[in-house]
Image: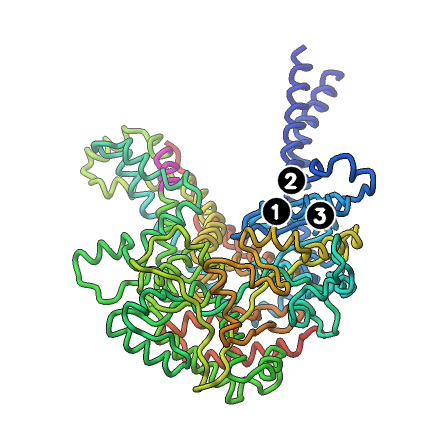
Amino acid sequence: MNKNKGRSRFLVLCLAPATILFFVFMIIPTLNVFRMSLFERGAYSPNETFVGLKNFQMLITDTQFIRSMQNMILLVVIVTIITFGFALVFAAILTREKIKGQNFFRIVFYIPNILSVVVIAGIFSAIYKPENGMLNSIIGLFTTMTDPILWKGETLVIPSLIIAMVWQAIGYYMVMYMASMSAVPESLYESANLDGAGRVTQFFQITIPLIWTNIRTTLTFFIISTINMAFLFVKAMTSGGPNGASDVALNYMYSQKDAGLYGYSMAIGVVIFLFSFALSAIVNKATDREPLEF
Amino acid sequence: MKKVISLALAASMALSLAACGGAGSSSAATDSAAATGEGAAAAEATTIKVAAIETAYGTEMWQKVADAFTAQTGINVELTTDKNLEDVIGPSMQGGDYPDVIHLATGREAALTEQFIKGNLIADITDVLSMNVPGEDVKVSDKIAGGFTETSLTNPYNDGKTYLAPMFYSPCGLFYNAGLLKEKGWEVPTTWDEMWELGDKALEEGIYLFTYPTTGYFDAFFYALMYSTGGPEFFEKATHYEEGIWDTPEAQTCFDIVTKLAQYTNPITPAQANDQDFTQNQQLVLDNKAIFMPNGTWIVGEMAEAPRADGFEWGMTALPAVSEGGDRYSYTWFEQCWIPSGAEHQDAAKQFIAFLYSDTACQIFAESGAIQPVLGIADTLEGDNKLFYSIYDNGAKAAMGNFAAFTAIPGVEVRTAFFDPVNSLVSGSITEQQWIDGVKSASDQMRANIIE
């Protein structure tokens, strides 16, 4: 009895720091975001006025907000699909095939992930530079360009962002998929080989189903991290320009805070919060399968 | 025994976690109290907190001025300087802890000063103007050059009271490579018609007429343009969003000139017109790929290390006149220094602001290239600065002021409505009329929310 009491006290002591910190720094601020979205106040003014759902009503008619949401959704969808595809294929190649310099490729793919976003923004700035930029110089070798391609111009800025974001994210997910792929027993592939299944069939019939739980988890990661990453990339690479063409929702939220609309920007925060929550839930539900074991 | 060890471990983990949480408010303050010595400390123990933005002028001058102020008045100064001052002082101000003096100009992206203006959170410093400069027998108002304390940048509420003290001024205009024009035998245009002529001539040689660092640089340009098309009266009405003002012929001239200028702009400009790449647009001028760009005198220091075309030489001109013999304007950009109304030591803070106009302080600032708006300072300048600051002696008129403050409206800001569309004008994705329509609808909302 006495021993039990000491044990539970010990458990409480162990759990308390994390719980308290989580509560103070995660739960309370999150609740505060919801509360403040119902008020209107400047970031520095002490008075706030309750405006109910007025902030949300204005959001619906704010074309800049709608455009920034569209951009964000576009980035989430496209970046997820491309990264997901590439990461899976690269992971399969690097685990299943015997190619020279496997470790080298693994490191090369992973390096972008340890670079900070600001560094990546700098690298891509040099790549996308209209004059003497790497990309335009390479294209210039094959064709004669009269006008330089404006990678960060209005029409191409979103594809340019996508390329940078995919480049940054592939390595991380590739390593995650490689870890679970190498856990798949070799014998399954051997027997599939005997049955005459080719590599592509093996990939779709054996590899994918067996790492499905992993794929589901990473899809949630994709959604949350792309929303955050989109903000970082936009902030560091384009500041939302030219003329708002690359604005994303989090960046817009940030700029509205700077415009002195704290409540309004919190309302944007609430929308993004609910959006990412809902999207993760939908994806989780849609990808639900009976887990296979080996 | 085991239990004791695990308890100790758990406790230490809790402590270290708590320490991580508490360390968020690292202080960037550099304390100058040490410089006061024992003599002054006895007189008055007041310590004021001064927060100043670090710009191209560096931070050393602030430390020197703070030391000089302490030596003069015995008031200690706790100085905070940072390039991202908003991020350093912002969080503590949200918690109600304000610096006594803040030197931070309007027009920055984080718009902290604008938020304080919009929130009526700045102390009235009209009485500073009639105070004597510490250590001198002159009133502050007698030192500050004419016009600087009468603009909407210092008197944001149009009520005759001064809330922000004018600091370091810089004439803005069109910067160009004087060497290139000399080499080609081109004249600096004095009217817009001559400007377009030059543009056609230059384009034949593969040089574009115009570029801009970011659309943010259009504010000074557009203000001066409004002055030169319609004079101070039109400027006053336009910056107060008067009804129908954008339908007047003067406004139409402004829009037409910017639209035409967009056609003469180096087409790669918008792709680099962001905070990351704007120096590459400035580089276009140094490489003779564009002739003119709107900028301020800080450009010389900012691009000091950049490679440049042979025979490069900085030149600066006021905006061309709309018609032959018309007025030419150069916008006077200046920074602001102010006291938050929540500041603790208001009186000492006012003394500090007064001291910023003393001969000692002006000289310290000038050594770093920061020019205080005091009378007679232009005579003491040397080098490039002498040329730039003499622009008003060479026939250009000074344009001052800005758009009137309005309470924040979701999605409507001066820059996004007025200037950002220039990027789209250059790339041709919107028409002039679409731009004007956007300006009009934004202007209507701003008028409805103007702070009087």
Q: Amino acid at mark 2?
A: Thr
Q: Nearer the viewer, mark 2 or mark 3?
A: 3
Q: Quadrant of the rendered structure where residue A142 is? A: bottom left
**Image side of residue B411 versus residue B99, left or right:** left
Q: Position of residue A277 (x, y in %)?
A: 54, 52
- Reading the image, the residue beneath label 1 is B81
At a point 70% along the width and 53% down the height, the residue shown is B101
**Depth check, front residue: B129 or B132:** B132
Instruction: Check chain identity for marks 3 and 1: say if they share one.
Output: yes
Q: Nearer the viewer, mark 3 or mark 1?
A: 3
For marks 2 and 1 on the same chain, the one whose residue lies earlier in the sequence: 2
Q: CA distance from mark 3 to mark 1?
A: 17 Å
**Depth check, front residue: A56 or B434:** B434
- Reading the image, the residue beneath label 2 is B30
Q: Does dot 3 land on a helix, a strand or a loop? A: helix
> Does the rendering let one see residue A210?
no
Instruction: Check chain identity for marks 2 and 3: say if they share one.
Output: yes
Q: CA distance from mark 2 to mark 1?
A: 8 Å
Q: Amino acid at mark 3?
A: Phe
What range is drawn magenta here? Answer: A171-179
The chain under label 3 reads: B
Answer above or below: position of B28 versus B210. Answer: above
> Does the rendering let one see residue B261?
yes
Q: Position of residue B359 (x, y in %)?
A: 66, 55
**Image side of residue B163 versus residue B363, left or right:** right
Answer above or below: position of A6 versus A81. Answer: above
Structural crowding at the residue carrying mark 2, measured as other residues with C-alpha within 10 Å and reported as few (<14), some (14–19) or many (≥20): few
Question: Does the stretch in magenta take in B24?
Answer: no
Q: Are marks 2 and 1 in contact (CB under 8 Å)?
A: yes
At a point 46% along the width and 67% down the height, the residue shown is B215
Q: Quadrant of the rendered structure where residue B67 is? A: top right
Q: Which mark is residue B69?
A: 3
